[in-house]
Amino acid sequence: MDILLVADIHSGSTVSPVHPKAKLESGMSVGPNPFQKRILRPFWLEMCKVPVDRAITLGDMTDGKNVKDEGCGVWSGNVSLQTLNAALLLRELNIKPDEDGYKRIDAIGGSGYHIGSNPSSDQLVCSKINELNDKSAVKFDAHYHGMEFILNAEKSKIHFSHKMSTGFYQGTALNRELMYSYLYQYDIDGMIRAHIHHYHMDTDGNRFAVSLPGWKGRDKYLQSFGLKYLSQIGWVILRLEDGHWSLHPTLKSLKNIIKTVRA
Ligand SMILES: [Fe+2]
Ligand SMILES: [Fe+2]
């Protein structure tokens, strides 16, 4: 079974993917900027060519008010428009329909300051994905599972949640949590995290811990940390087969888009 892992789309941000049918409050289309048009859109469509059995989104599907940049850096802070854009994007994924003809997406919630909590935008995106079935021959079945869940498939148990601490070296946070799971004898084969917008994988040969790339470029907040958070965009395929797991990342580093000033 091939599972597409998509994290941190941050729909609404001016440095995140935008669907051609996404609308502003005026009803006009969003109109992508060069970064969205030349880098994000083609890379998103590349992901949408990959056939998978199902997809799991790991939170921060919307940017909300982008609190840390004081409301700047979004094309709209309107939750309804941000969730619609995210739903339109996710309905482009190449997911094999199940026996009933539905393409399955599972989701967890992200960081409160991007998605709110009553209800979270990640939950609303799932509702919107399903609502859009009425206007399309393609049917999706999106499920929101709150802040964490364990997937039990192909004799493997994988734990999903969004947040992890944002230390300088991602491996420290991942290994600490993996160690807790040993200490408390949680019966899992792997854990998948998002939030830091960077791929990092560790394994002891049996179990694994991985953080995912995201889909948001470098906003002002990230730039203020210099090279600490370079940010990657991309996706990961989790392959589960009869008790075996493997991870297949496709990544684009954004380190080369930092402005260069010539003397
Ligand atoms: Fe995020
Ligand atoms: Fe986050």
Image: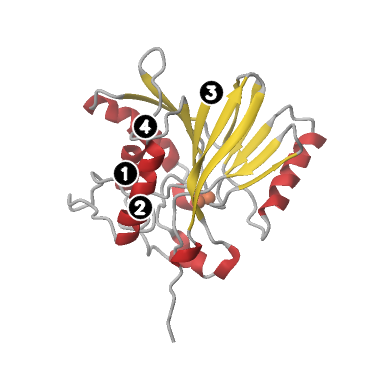
At mark 3, the secondary structure is: loop
Tell me the mark number nearer the camera, choosing from 3 and 4.
3
Please state the horizontal and vertical placement of residue 208, each as a whole percent of the image. Answer: 69, 37
In the drawing, what numbered circle is on residue 85?
1
Tell me the mark number nearer the camera, choosing from 4 and 1.
1
Amino acid type at circle 3 is Met
Q: Residue furthest bottom?
A: 263
Q: Tell me where residue 185 sits by quadrant.
A: top right
Task: Please rate how many residues cluster around mark 3, counting C-alpha atoms within 10 Å: few if below 14, some from 14 to 19, many from 20.
Answer: some
The CA distance from mark 4 to mark 1 is 13 Å
> Ligand 1 near label 3 (Cβ, under 8 Å)?
no
Tell me the mark number nearer the camera, choosing from 2 and 4.
2
Task: Please rate how many residues cluster around mark 4, counting C-alpha atoms within 10 Å: few if below 14, some from 14 to 19, many from 20.
Answer: some
Tell me the mark number nearer the camera, choosing from 3 and 2.
3
Instruction: Name which of mark 3 and mark 4 comes first in the sequence.
Output: 3
In the rendered view, would you say 237 is above or below 103?
below
